[in-house]
Image (cartoon, grey):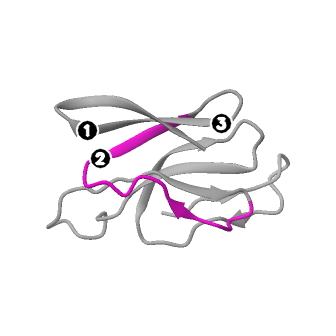
Amino acid sequence: MNVYVMNDDGGKVRQLTDTPFSKGNLSWSPEGRQMTYAPDLHSGDHRRQQQIDIFLINADGTSEQNLTQHPALDTTSCWSPDGTHLVFSSAREEGWELYKMEE
């Protein structure tokens, strides 16, 4: 599953990602220049447990980067209103907790 964007009128469809992983939890930055999403890096291999990390990509599909790179499940990111922080949930400790990182 890949991520696509388009104009308000449905025109100019553009593909942002090109990977075989299932993706979820899309979150646009407040100014709309970047987006985070959380792919399952093992979605194509049912013999392995899920591995979900938070990724950042520019609105034009460039500069994709893995922000979390942790063996725990990292998902459901949300930007601060001013775009300087990103909050996400993670199962790093016993149970789910919220973590904050600076952009």
Whole-Å distance between the Cαs marked 2 and 1? 6 Å
Mark 3 sits on what residue? 84
> Residues at badges 2 and 1 in contact (C-beta under 8 Å)?
yes
Kindly report the secondary structure that dominates the magenta region of the rendered protein: loop
Q: Residue at x 45, y 55 (%)?
A: 23
Mark 2 sits on what residue? 73
Position of 47 with respect to 20 (left or right) is left
Q: Residue at x 58, y 65 (%)?
A: 64
| Disc on the earlier residue, 1 or 3 | 3
Q: Residues within 10 Å of mark 2 (few under 14, many from 20)?
A: some
Say which of marks 2 and 3 sits in front.
3
Q: Is residue 91 above or below residue 5?
A: above
Instruction: Where is residue 91? Give x, y as percent.
Output: 25, 38
Q: Residues within 10 Å of mark 3 (few under 14, many from 20)?
A: few
For the residue labelled by badge 1, is the local secondary structure a helix, a strand or a loop? strand
Whole-Å distance between the Cαs marked 1 and 3? 23 Å
| Disc on the earlier residue, 2 or 3 | 2
Out of 48 and 34, give the one closest to the viewer: 34
> Residues at badges 2 and 3 in contact (C-beta under 8 Å)?
no
Position of 25 with respect to 61 (left or right) is left
For badge 2, the amino acid type reads Leu
For badge 1, the amino acid type reads Ala
Question: Which segment is the magenta one?
Answer: 60-78
Q: Residue at x 23, y 70 (%)?
A: 45
Instruction: Where is residue 25? Give x, y as percent.
Output: 48, 43
